[in-house]
Image (cartoon, helix red, strand yellow):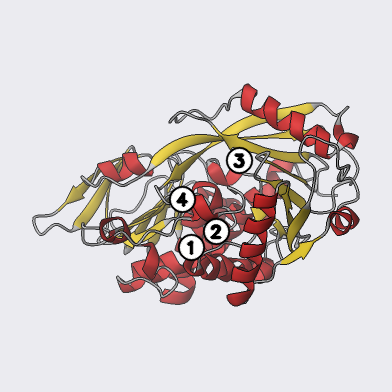
């Protein structure tokens, strides 16, 4: 009987040793590509996939300074929803949510998308007013959202505490039933495998150290730790490091970078049937397929590139979570971390051409990046291939900050995530 080691099984799963070696561990990148994507997370790999699958560009490289899915894609809290207030946001995020529904079939890779519902709690009269405003705005855009009484909220999530005497009493909730979660790293691997099958080169451990601009002001090459790579089209999707990378081209963006806190509990049997979020408390919780309770907190108050997170922020969140969900009080924290998020002044993304011809950028998602992955990748690929924005990202160009056409989800959002 033939015996298989774990490594040989892994090679078999990815098409044999030769496929793994030439595509995933390429000895050196080619000298020139039709397009280069900087950033090997979900958005970058997805953009490369759609460039190949829908726009016929197969001579593409994705360059990643670390490993595939090792940045924000691998350290987020997996929430997917589209109940944003403004028309532009709702349309873009709902485009993404619709793509999530069929993404496993499209990529032939299980992303573990679970539309279990996202429920946003209201604790004050102001919360109730804001939530109902969101519901009406969402319905006007064809996005599902509904109001629940405290009793209906508890019926939907039985472990929720609706005692009126707690510090933050639950006065009701907004529920988007189509929302839910997916497993973060499967998205990166699904897009990577599908892009690889279409001929895209995925080059890990390849940090960008500079950009070369020709005399006409167009991009002609990037400099990396593995040599110079030439291309007349370069898309930058380097969450948490966008300002650094774009600085090589002499472009300054209205971005700030912060660590966003999160943690998981020790694994337990299923007790959490949905996602529950609270902006007043700034806490949210769901349960992963491994049984861990995934608990998110707020951003650090200071700009930083650290990925450790601040324990004091997590401690405040856990106090509130234990009051809303008393059943979790005796659980232990398994690990905590901070993911680096780039945020714009209006907390909405930039998906845009830049002043350098052939250079494009996708950044500034703040806490909204994971949920937008397929939709963001799809419209970014369109922008790169056609040198013009897709209709869904026309409002998200760099020029909106010059023209004052902000999409201020920072002030409007019912919750920051």
Nearer to the camera, 32 or 415: 415
Label 3: which secondary element: helix
Q: Estimate how packed mark 3 is, as few (under 14), some (14 to 19) or many (20 or more) residues with alpha carbons within 10 Å.
A: many
Residue 410 position, x and y percent, is 49, 50
* Crowd rating for badge 2 (residues with CA inside 10 Å; few <14, some 14–19, many 20+): many
Residue 282 visible somewhere in the drawing: yes
Give the SS element for disc 4: loop
Depth check, front residue: 19 or 40: 40
Residue annotated with mark 1: 377
Q: Say which label, 2 or 3, has the lower sequence index.
A: 3
**For residue 384, what is the image quadrant?**
bottom left
Left or right, residue 331 beside residue 6? right
Point 21% across, 56% down: residue: 219
**Of all residues shown, which one is farthest toward the top?**
312
Q: Identify residue for label 3.
A: 75
Dot 4 corresponds to which residue? Answer: 347
Alpha carbons under labels 2 and 4: distance apart: 16 Å
Mark 1 and mark 4: Cα distance apart in space:
18 Å
Residue occupying the point 45% across, 68% down: 379
Q: Position of residue 272 (x, y in %)?
A: 85, 48
Q: CA distance from mark 1 to mark 2?
A: 6 Å
Mark sitting on residue 373: 2
């Amino acid at each position: 009987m033939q015996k298989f080691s774990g490594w040989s099984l892994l090679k078999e799963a990815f098409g044999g040793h030769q496929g793994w070696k030439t595509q995933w561990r390429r000895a050196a990148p080619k000298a020139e590509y039709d397009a280069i994507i900087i950033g090997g997370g979900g958005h970058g790999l997805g953009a490369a996939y759609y460039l190949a699958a829908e726009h016929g560009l197969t001579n593409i490289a994705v360059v990643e300074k670390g490993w595939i899915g090792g940045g924000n894609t691998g350290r987020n809290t997996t929430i997917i929803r589209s109940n944003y207030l403004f028309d532009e946001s709702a349309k873009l995020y709902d485009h993404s949510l619709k793509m999530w529904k069929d993404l496993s079939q499209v990529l032939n890779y299980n992303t573990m998308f679970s539309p279990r519902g996202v429920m946003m709690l209201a604790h004050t009269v102001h919360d109730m007013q804001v939530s109902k405003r969101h519901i009406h705005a969402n319905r006007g855009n064809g996005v599902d959202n509904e109001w629940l009484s405290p009793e209906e909220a508890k019926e939907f999530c039985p472990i929720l505490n609706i005692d009126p005497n707690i510090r933050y009493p639950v006065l009701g909730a907004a529920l988007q039933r189509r929302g839910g979660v997916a497993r973060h790293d499967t998205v990166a691997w699904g897009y990577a495998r599908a892009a690889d099958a279409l001929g895209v080169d995925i080059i890990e451990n390849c940090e960008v150290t500079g950009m070369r601009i020709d005399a006409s002001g167009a991009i002609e090459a990037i400099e990396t730790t593995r040599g110079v790579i030439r291309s007349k089209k370069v898309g930058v999707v380097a969450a948490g490091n966008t300002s650094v990378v774009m600085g090589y081209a002499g472009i300054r963006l209205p971005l700030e970078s912060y660590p966003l806190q999160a943690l998981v509990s020790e694994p337990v049997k299923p007790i959490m049937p949905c996602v529950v979020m609270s902006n007043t408390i700034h806490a949210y919780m769901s349960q992963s397929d491994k049984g861990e309770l995934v608990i998110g907190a707020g951003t650090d108050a200071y700009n930083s590139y650290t990925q450790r997170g601040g324990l004091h922020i997590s401690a405040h969140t856990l106090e509130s979570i234990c009051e809303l969900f008393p059943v979790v009080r005796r659980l232990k924290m398994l690990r905590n971390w901070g993911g680096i998020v780039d945020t714009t002044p209006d907390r909405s993304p930039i998906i845009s051409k830049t002043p350098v011809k052939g250079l494009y950028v996708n950044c500034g998602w703040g806490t909204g990046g994971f949920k937008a992955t397929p939709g963001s990748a799809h419209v970014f690929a369109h922008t790169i291939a056609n040198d013009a924005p897709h209709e869904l990202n026309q409002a998200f160009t760099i020029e909106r900050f010059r023209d004052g056409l902000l999409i201020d989800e920072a002030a409007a959002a019912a919750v920051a995530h």
